[in-house]
Every structure is written in structure tokens, then in C-alpha cells.
Image (tube, rainbow, N blue to C red):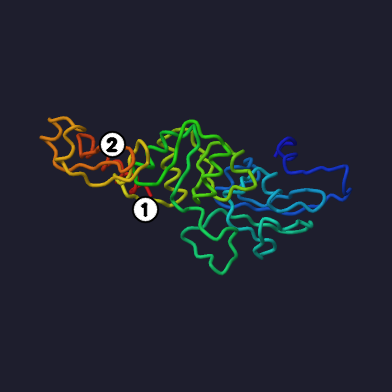
Amino acid sequence: MNKMEADRFIKKDKNHSPVLRKSVFRFYEELNDHLPEPVRKKEFTFEFTGTPSVKNSIQAIGIPHGEVDLILVNGEPVDFDYQMQGGEKISVYPVFESLDISPVERLRPEPLRDPRFVVDVNLGKLALKLRLLGFDTLFRNDFEDDEIIRISLGEKRIILTRDKGILKQNVVKHGYFLRNDDPKKQLKEVVDRLQLHHKFRPFSRCVSCNGELQKADKKELNQLVSDDTLQYYNEFWQCSDCGQVYWKGSHFGNILRWIEDLKQEH
């Protein structure tokens, strides 16, 4: 680690306590993506003054607290408000899905991986793909950060973003920072990291507005679908919110293969 990287892990406060304290941190799994290479997946010393909360210290290190689900101090679970004293050994874990940690105190009563999302403004293609897989996904290209946070808190939705600043807001509870900037890779990342492979419900949501799709009566679609389409197809679905009509067109087979490939990559 060079000096510039090392300085990220030192909190200096000359106007307060002159005592420099030290604790040992170890971050697990995908939380390491936020750390410089020399300290990934290994113990390192964090220096500080005063008695900061473990939450503030984690964020000072560069980890969005919205991705943290379990903190152990000397082997015992603590919450975000734990005041650091120095000398602790602190282990920080992301959300657990398949591992049973029920005997341990989680930082939030419900899993981060509840598959309902609110998506940041620069992730529109990801939002459409999630809707195609059947996930309840809110997106607008004019969302402000405070609106995204309000929706996440009010509706218990996971924030998906490429902006760490949103996830570092103290009030944020559920969030995930996308490591990739390619939409195809982003979808695979979300599915893999949040273990969504067995939660797909394809063709159940409108890709345009996120509304739920309902089976439609072909006889009532004369003004909405062309005569040729009505002649060649028998099954139709309509969005309960915006009214858009869907049917198993020429791309249906390709979409099914794409979904199956996404499952098999797990």
C-alpha cells in the first residue's frame, strides 16, 4: 500500500483527543470491491482519534453502510452505533442469503435482498431487464437522490446505483453499488450478488411502466393491436397501469433462451 492509500485509513483530529487509537478491520466477500488491492480480503489496521461509531469508521474506510448486514467486534455482534475504543478486532460482512445466521444479530430486521428495486437515473437499461425478468423495479430518468432514498425507505426497496454517495447517506438501509458499467454485465452482477436466479417471473411486468400484466381478451383489442397480429396470435397480455399490450412475437424464443442462459450461469 502506498502512502496515499494508507492515509485513507487514518482519521486525524488535532483539535480533540491527542490519543491515536488503533483497531483491526477485516471485510468479507463483495465488500472488498470498495477497498484498494493491498487490503482486500485481509486484516488491516485502522487508526482514529476519539470514539467514532463503527458505522462512521466503515464509511470513512470507503464501504457504503447500505451493503453491510453483520458486524462482529471481537466475535460479538454489534449495531452501527457501537463506539470504537481501540484494540478491537472488527469483522464486517455483506448480506447473507444462503447461510443461516439466525443466532446472530443482523443489522436490519429484513434481508437486503428483498427483490424490489428503485434504480438510479443512469441505469435505465438495467431497470428494463429487471422488469422483463419480473422484478418490481421503479425507474425514472429524472429521479433526484433524495426521492430515490425516500422511495427506498417508504417501500422497502433496494437502491441500485453507480453513485456511492447515495448509499453513504445515514438513512439508507437497503442498497447495492453496481461495479460494472455495461448493462449486460450489470444484470448478471445483480442476479448473482443478490441470488435472484430462482425468483424470476418473466413476462409478468410491463417493461415500459413496471405495471403488472394481466391476461387480455383478444376480442377487446381491436383498437390496440393490428389486424395481422390478431390473426396470427391468440394469447395476449395487457398492462394494468398503462394499457400496453404484449404477445409472444418473433423475439419470444430468443428471450426465453436468454433467461435460461442467465439461470444456467449460476
Q: Residues within 10 Å of mark 1 (few under 14, many from 20)?
A: few
Q: Which mark is residue 266?
A: none
Report the residue that reaches farthest toward the left: 231
- Rounded to the nearest angstrom, the CA distance separating label 2 from label 1 is 24 Å
Identify the residue position indicated by label 1 in the image.
199
Q: Quadrant of residue 103?
A: bottom right
Foreground of the two, 243 or 82:
243
Q: What x and y, as percent, mark residue 55?
A: 68, 51
- Residue drawn at the location 17% of the way across and 44% of the way down: 217
- Residue drawn at the location 20% of the way across and 36% of the way down: 249
Give the quarter of the figure containing the N terminus. Answer: top right
Residue 100 position (above or below residue 64): below
Q: Quadrant of residue 104?
A: bottom right
Q: What x and y, as percent, mark residue 152?
A: 52, 46
Foreground of the two, 6 or 140:
140
Report the residue that reaches farthest toward the bottom: 103
Identify the residue position indicated by label 2 in the image.
244
Q: Are marks 2 and 1 in contact (CB under 8 Å)?
A: no
Relative side of 202 to 192, left or right = left
Identify the secondary structure beneath mark 1.
helix
Q: How many marks?
A: 2
Kind of residue indicated by mark 2: Gln
Kind of residue indicated by mark 1: Lys
Q: What x and y, as percent, mark residue 80?
A: 67, 55
- Residue drawn at the location 53% of the way across and 55% of the way down: 95
Instruction: Specify which label sits upstream in the sequence, 2 or 1.
Output: 1
Foreground of the two, 17 or 5:
17
Relative side of 54 to 182, left or right = right
Foreground of the two, 218 or 28:
218
Identify the secondary structure beneath mark 2.
loop
Q: Quadrant of residue 226?
A: top left
Relative side of 160 to 196, left or right = right
